[in-house]
Image: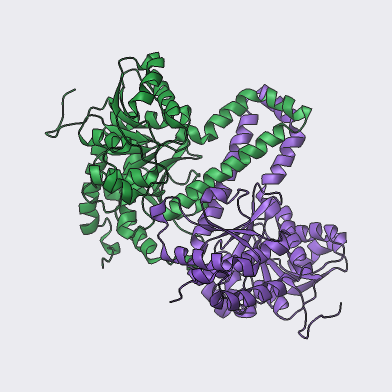
Chain colours: A purple, B green
Amino acid sequence: MSNDTDQPQPNAHIISIDAMGGDRGVPSVVAGVALAAKANPGIRFLIHGDEAEIAPLVRKQRILDKRCDIRHADETVGMEDKPSHVMRHGKKTSMWATIDAVRNGDASVAVSCGNTGALMAVSMIRLRKALGVNRPAIAVLWPSLNPQGFNVVLDVGADIRADEHDLFKYALMGSSYARNGLSIEKPRIGLLNVGTEEHKGRSELREAHAMIGNGARRNGYEFVGFVEGGDIPSDRVDVIVTDGFTGNVALKTGEGTANLIALRMRDAFNHSLFSRLGALFAYTSLKRLGRRIDPRHVNGGVFLGLNGTVIKSHGAADATGVAAAIQLAIKLAELRFTEKLAARVASGTLTSQDMPDEPSEITQRK
Amino acid sequence: MSNDTDQPQPNAHIISIDAMGGDRGVPSVVAGVALAAKANPGIRFLIHGDEAEIAPLVRKQRILDKRCDIRHADETVGMEDKPSHVMRHGKKTSMWATIDAVRNGDASVAVSCGNTGALMAVSMIRLRKALGVNRPAIAVLWPSLNPQGFNVVLDVGADIRADEHDLFKYALMGSSYARNGLSIEKPRIGLLNVGTEEHKGRSELREAHAMIGNGARRNGYEFVGFVEGGDIPSDRVDVIVTDGFTGNVALKTGEGTANLIALRMRDAFNHSLFSRLGALFAYTSLKRLGRRIDPRHVNGGVFLGLNGTVIKSHGAADATGVAAAIQLAIKLAELRFTEKLAARVASGTLTSQDMPDEPSEITQRK
């Protein structure tokens, strides 16, 4: 493939994968890679980790034959390792090598099931923040009532703080992700807040409201204003912008609620002979329902705002979950998403500060 | 009923109800009162609002005969009215009169479907904050995997801010609510935070962690430490403490997720002849499932930390929802919850500051 710019381009057809650090261990990751390989014949994989453990598992998957390079790493980042420790002492870990493969252009997107904080820290120091970004964000696809089936929510946990400038960048990054990842030409953006008038008082939210509104026309999105938690899975918006503390609580609350309902449903269908018969008749429909609300099928938080795309798979992901995260990586790699996002944020940064759409609504900068 | 203290006691058998301000209007409220009346033969009701509209509806409900006084109010608080405006100009509203009936001892608990912000504002100025409380909170019962079926979450929106002292008071108030409302002798309390180590950095959360931990033994609760959004519906805790911004987003995200899944379930069962047959067979079980996850059956946010108990029913509540809120009011009235809570917070306030359980872990006060 020839490059269309002067810069060296990463190979869009190679995905870098950290085999270590997931709760279910290497077998789930390799099985997930095999599932993704089957669905994507043109893609190759770089797998990082303990070669002695990975190699036999890869050999057993015939679909991975000649499509998979294993790069041995001596060390593994544990779920309890502190990000600051990994930043200083993590050079020999599989996570570090997974990110470095993207940094070096050996692969286009990195995927890891490991410790989120450590993965963000390593990604920050190895890939560096993109021009104009102060705080990178983690974006997820959230099941919704929209035709595309998902909304984008960010930040869900890269940083517990976000000021008005960060929130504006999240709007730019989120709309770029929705445009590329979900094919929505003009994404509708909402800023997460709480209901009553008097509560609309956090100053950074008021200022972000003005900045995101001012930047709408120039950056090709629509701003619907403040939205509430109930709007996250709705069809009122495509992108929900919030700080990483609130976004993380919302994400985990949504997952917890879905799990509770799934458990209750299982109880209900197991309750009597009639209900078990009912489940049998409705089997196909229930299975399709399961697929639509199964979090494993939308696994993968995307780190936005770095010079390179990194996908955090759920720590507890099984093969299906890992395959979903890799599928997302392949999609973003083929779209050359990293480059498009960088261009969007860089241009949005310049214009929004200096030229609001409506001169009468110029955002006051401190 | 004789008083067991020197103070005049509100009549535990009278509930004060605001008939105005709900999204579905007076008919839903009166129908809800009738449902509650049927289930609670010993209870009487004070209904506030437009007499011309309320009286004919009450007359149609034979169960309300001689159990219901209507108190006319000229004005209604609208959903869009600002709390500050209602505080200054709301004396003639049904909401104001509903709260004043509790203040005057004519009723023991107040229920309203109106504007949350205005209801909290009127409750604050008419009932006043309880001794030792700086920020009152709104607590809800959240469907959970616990044997009691619910967890207590607070604050879900009384105030967008909460410092470590407020969060400690929320722990005291929440455990008192769990003890009285859910009959849990020694409630387990969790403090809501986000996952990774590095993120446990908000200073008020670290300090609240120490204060709530120190107060555990003396105040008869167990402190499980930090919990995440996914733990809200779990059986790891009985009470989840957080600030009103985060709690409100979590509550509405949970509701939105449940609604999304309910819609998808309906689609699934309507999909084919087989799935419709399945739904028929599983009808009873599905109906029971519906009751267990139906937010209408756990309707009612309780305002804690005031000299009087106020219950905010969902604005969109139908008769079933209104009845659930009134049922909760009756339960709390019969338990004399207001008095018990006040005693708990007042004693917890004194002891926690001066005498931590473990002298080696004394919380540093600024």
Residue displayed at 61% across by 54% down = A237
Question: Hey, which residue is sitting farthest front in the picture?
Answer: A360
Toward the viewer: B274 or B99? Answer: B99
Residue displayed at 53% across by 46% down = B254
Place of residue A276 in the rendered image (x, y in percent of width and height, measured from the top left): 69, 27
**Left or right of A267 in this view: A54:** right
Toward the viewer: B358 or A64? Answer: A64
Q: Quadrant of residue A335?
A: bottom right
Rendered position, A114 above or below B309: below
Place of residue A291 in the rendered image (x, y in percent of width and height, measured from the top left): 72, 45
**Left or right of A129 in this view: B319:** left
Place of residue A261 in the rendered image (x, y in percent of width and height, measured from the top left): 59, 39
Quadrant where the image shows the C terminus of chain A: bottom left
Residue B352 visible to the viewer: yes
Rendered position, B67 above or below A307: above
Toward the viewer: B201 or B60? Answer: B60
Place of residue B102 in the rendered image (x, y in percent of width and height, measured from the top left): 25, 34
Residue displayed at 59% across by 70% down = A120
